[in-house]
Image (tube, helix red, strand yellow):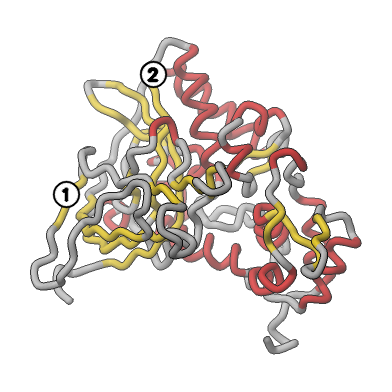
């Protein structure tokens, strides 16, 4: 790591006040100093300083301080340097939002790989992708030697190829729009901080919202519950966000006019991947499309109600799937 390119301690410390730490009972302290330093592009001694400045950790003999991954990711996202791994991932994933609508609606072919964190047989259970939704076509790449590998207990890796087509749509029910706008207002006003949330807390989404923290998983589940409380037919979906890097994403869907329409609070709130920056006018059309439209880089999985996509059977807990997804735009040949 070159000192001139590394993130300054001041930037990281300043960022600690811009998000809420994961409460200890919902945290999992398994990220060591070296891993945290790599994610934040900073020397290891700065990670130790973050602990001194209040970032929660647990000390493990012979290892040193261990941090919750969500806290580390949030420290990077809130450094506002644009050079930590979490920031670069968000920027690369969301840069398509500033392009013309054909870039997020026209048919697009993808080669997708999902893998478990390690190769121990039987430890992880992975959720399958769901190729049955509108705009999704499963592809058998001829001559590539691939096959779609079913997920489940013991599966360590699977690959698939799909064509995704978006569509421009709009939700018309004013009750849905009121709920959608209220949630966005809470995020814009800072009453709820949009940040990385631990997997355990994602699944306790009302508690996360009441604690004042939410990510796309939390907002998708909260808005689906609120819409159902009003008598609408709604569901939270969770799947893969495809782009220069792969990630998880979650959104809500509302049944209207005989079809499912996407309501994506997370995309609408943070179309650029840099929530602290002024939103460029080029993203206005994209933000408007988040209330009804379907995009060509979201591949849903079979997990119901935005449940976890990967289960650690050894530890008996769900895990986040970030950094375990690979995606490549594909022209049909290799």
Quarter of the rendering containing residue 4: bottom right
Q: Is residue 205 left or right of residue 10?
A: left
Position of residue 274 in the picture relative to residue 312 (left or right): right
Q: Residues within 10 Å of mark 1 (few under 14, many from 20)?
A: some
Please tell me which residue is depicted at 34% across the width and 55% down the height of the picture: 155
Q: Which residue is mark 2?
A: 173
- Can you tell which mark lies on residue 28? none
- 203 in relation to 46, above or below: above
Q: Secondary structure at mark 1?
A: strand
Query: Which residue corresponds to the image point at 68% horizontal and 58% vertical from the top-left?
Result: 30
Between 59 and 286, which is closer to the camera in this rendering? 59
**Residue 63's spot in the image, x, y percent?**
77, 68
Residue at 70% from the left image edge and 59% from the top image edge:
72
Left or right, 155 with respect to 206, comes to left
Residue 149, x across and y down, in percent:
24, 56
Rendered view: 137 above or below 13: above
Left or right placement of residue 216 versus residue 44 in this view: left
Q: Where residue 198 sits in the image (x, y, percent)?
A: 63, 45
What residue lies at 75% left-to-right and 60% top-to-bottom?
A: 66
Q: Residue furthest right?
A: 52
- Locate the C terminus and report the quarter of the image it occupies: bottom left
Q: Secondary structure at mark 2?
A: loop
Q: Give the CA separation, mark 2 to mark 1.
A: 29 Å
Which labelled disc corresponds to residue 137? 1
Q: Is residue 119 above or below residue 254?
A: below
């Amino acid at each position: 790591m070159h000192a001139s390119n590394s993130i300054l301690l001041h930037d990281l410390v300043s960022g600690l006040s811009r998000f809420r730490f994961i409460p200890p009972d919902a945290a999992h302290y398994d990220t060591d100093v070296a891993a945290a330093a790599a994610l934040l592009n900073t020397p290891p001694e700065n990670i130790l300083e973050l602990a001194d400045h209040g970032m929660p950790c647990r000390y493990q003999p012979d290892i040193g301080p261990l941090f919750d991954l969500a806290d580390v990711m949030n420290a990077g996202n809130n450094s506002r340097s644009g050079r930590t791994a979490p920031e670069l991932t968000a920027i690369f994933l969301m840069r398509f939002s500033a392009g013309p609508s054909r870039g997020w609606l026209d048919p697009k072919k993808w080669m997708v790989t999902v893998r478990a964190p390690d190769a121990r047989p039987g430890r992880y259970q992975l959720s399958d992708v769901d190729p049955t939704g509108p705009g999704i076509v499963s592809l058998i790449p001829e001559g590539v030697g691939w096959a779609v590998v079913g997920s489940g207990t013991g599966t360590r890796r699977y690959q698939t190829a799909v064509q995704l087509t978006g569509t421009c749509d709009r939700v018309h029910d004013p009750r849905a729009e009121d709920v959608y706008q209220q949630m966005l207002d809470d995020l814009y006003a800072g009453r709820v901080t949009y940040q990385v949330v631990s997997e355990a807390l994602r699944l306790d989404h009302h508690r996360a919202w009441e604690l004042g923290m939410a990510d796309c998983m939390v907002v998708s589940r909260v808005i689906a519950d609120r819409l159902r409380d009003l008598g609408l037919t709604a569901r939270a979906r969770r799947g893969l966000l495809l782009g220069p890097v792969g990630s998880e994403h979650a959104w809500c869907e509302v049944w209207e006019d005989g079809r499912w329409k996407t309501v994506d609070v997370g995309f609408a709130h943070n179309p650029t991947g840099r929530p602290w920056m002024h939103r460029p006018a080029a993203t206005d059309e994209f933000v408007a499309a988040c209330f009804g439209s379907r995009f060509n880089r979201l591949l849903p999985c079979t997990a119901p109600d935005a449940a976890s996509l990967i289960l650690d059977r050894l530890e008996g807990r769900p895990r986040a799937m970030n950094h375990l997804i690979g995606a490549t735009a594909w022209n049909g040949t290799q």
